[in-house]
Image (tube, rainbow, N blue to C red):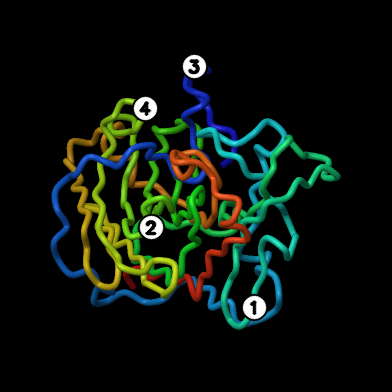
């Protein structure tokens, strides 16, 4: 992600890269309830990935900010910009492809042995509250770490104070488990206090599934295929450390290599490995 402010240098290896949970999140209040488009909401932003061969630059930009210095969490990838081998649109889906290659001719090359892609809506679109739905088929192969997540648009508080919502993370050494997690100043993986939950999906990589976030002033629900498995409630104490989610956030799609995904190594035979996104839709109350 972009440079994170106001964190001690000693934590640098643990800062955001794909998403931040380095260990499975401790379960919070169970979200054992349906998740669906709330009544009275309408579509305010979307990308169906049905035109052109590259992402719409009016909606997305590439995040390459840490290529030279190296990405957080001991991740191993170089995030390419405007390179169809890594990010493209084909057959009506967005493809983010991780590859085993050294892009040493790039001016910001940092010695990585792998390439991938990271798209963000930072600077093009952000939202305060809403219902988010992303239909995706995930990248598999040991070492992969696909993620669909959000960060607070105002970076002045630094991470984790700006707030992070992980709509979906999957580490491909455990491909039938997806994780939904939030991080705040009070609840984050550096302290081991992050809040989240996980659920089982039989086929994350061979089939498309719908990953969902329902976020309002009272609570956050994270779910998949209409079932909410993670719930985080606002304590309504006016404490930004526990609820920084009253401010806009932007969306991130990426496939990291290594880090949490590489805890059991990186399989050379996994490459190339693709995350495919059929659509991204954002709804808000009228």
From the viewer's perspective, is 167 left or right of 61?
left
- Report which quarter residue 209 is drawn in: bottom left
Give the Cα separation between the discs numbered 4 and 1: 39 Å
Q: Residue at x 83, y 41 (%)?
A: 107
Quadrant containing the C terminus in the rendered view: bottom left
Q: Would you place residue 8 above or below residue 57 in this image?
A: above
**Residue 148 occupies which quadrant of the picture?**
bottom left
Q: Which residue is mark 2?
A: 175
- What residue does disc 3 label? 10
Figure check: 161 above or below 86: above
Residue found 54% across the figure and 45% down from its top: 266
Quarter of the figure that contains the N terminus: top right
Which badge, 1 or 2, comes first in the chain's sequence? 1
Q: Residue at x 73, y 50 (%)?
A: 101
Secondary structure at numbered mark 3:
helix
**Label 2 packing within 10 angstroms: few (<14), some (14-19), many (20+):** many
- Residue under circle 1? 90
- Circles 4 and 2: CB distance less than 8 Å? no
Mark 3 crowdedness (10 Å alpha carbons): few <14, some 14-19, many ≥20: few
Tell which of 100 and 62 is nearer to you: 100
> On residue 190, which mark appears?
4
Q: Mark 4: few, some, or many residues within 10 Å (few <14, many ≥20)? A: some
**Quarter-wise, where is residue 39 in the image?**
bottom left
Residue at the right extreme of this rendering: 105
Disc number lying in front (3 or 2): 2
Q: Residues within 10 Å of mark 1 (few under 14, many from 20)?
A: some
Q: Position of residue 129 (x, y in %)?
A: 34, 58
Task: Give the CA distance from mark 4 to mark 2.
Answer: 24 Å
Which is closer to the viewer, label 4 or label 2? 2
Which circle's residue, 3 or 2, is located before the other in the chain? 3
Q: Secondary structure at mark 4?
A: loop
Report how far apart the C-alphas of labels 3 and 2 lie in the structure: 31 Å
């Amino acid at each position: 992600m972009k440079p994170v402010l106001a964190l001690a240098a000693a934590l640098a290896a643990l800062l955001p890269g794909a998403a931040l949970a380095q260990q499975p999140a401790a379960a919070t209040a169970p979200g054992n309830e349906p998740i669906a488009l709330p009544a009275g909401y309408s579509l305010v932003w979307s990308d169906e990935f049905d035109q052109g061969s590259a992402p719409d630059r009016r909606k997305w930009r590439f995040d390459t900010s840490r290529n030279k210095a190296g990405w957080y969490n001991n991740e191993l990838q170089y995030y390419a910009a405007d390179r169809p081998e890594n990010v493209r649109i084909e057959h009506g889906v967005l493809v983010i492809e991780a590859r085993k290659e050294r892009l040493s001719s790039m001016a910001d090359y940092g010695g990585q042995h792998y390439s991938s892609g990271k798209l963000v809506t930072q600077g093009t679109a952000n939202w305060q509250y809403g219902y988010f739905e992303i239909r995706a088929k995930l990248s598999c192969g040991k070492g992969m770490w696909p993620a669909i997540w959000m960060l607070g648009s105002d970076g002045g508080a630094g991470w984790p104070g700006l707030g992070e919502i992980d709509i979906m993370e999957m580490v491909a050494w455990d491909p039938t488990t997806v994780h939904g997690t939030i991080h705040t100043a009070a609840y984050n993986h550096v302290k081991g206090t992050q809040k989240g939950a996980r659920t089982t999906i039989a086929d994350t990589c061979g089939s498309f599934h719908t990953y969902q976030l329902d976020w309002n002033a009272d609570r956050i629900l994270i779910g998949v295929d209409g079932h909410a498995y993670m719930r985080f409630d606002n304590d309504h104490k006016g404490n930004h450390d526990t609820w920084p989610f009253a401010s806009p956030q932007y969306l991130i799609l990426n496939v990291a290599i290594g880090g949490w995904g590489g805890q059991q190594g990186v399989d050379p035979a996994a490459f190339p490995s693709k995350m495919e996104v059929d659509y991204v839709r954002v709804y808000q109350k009228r």
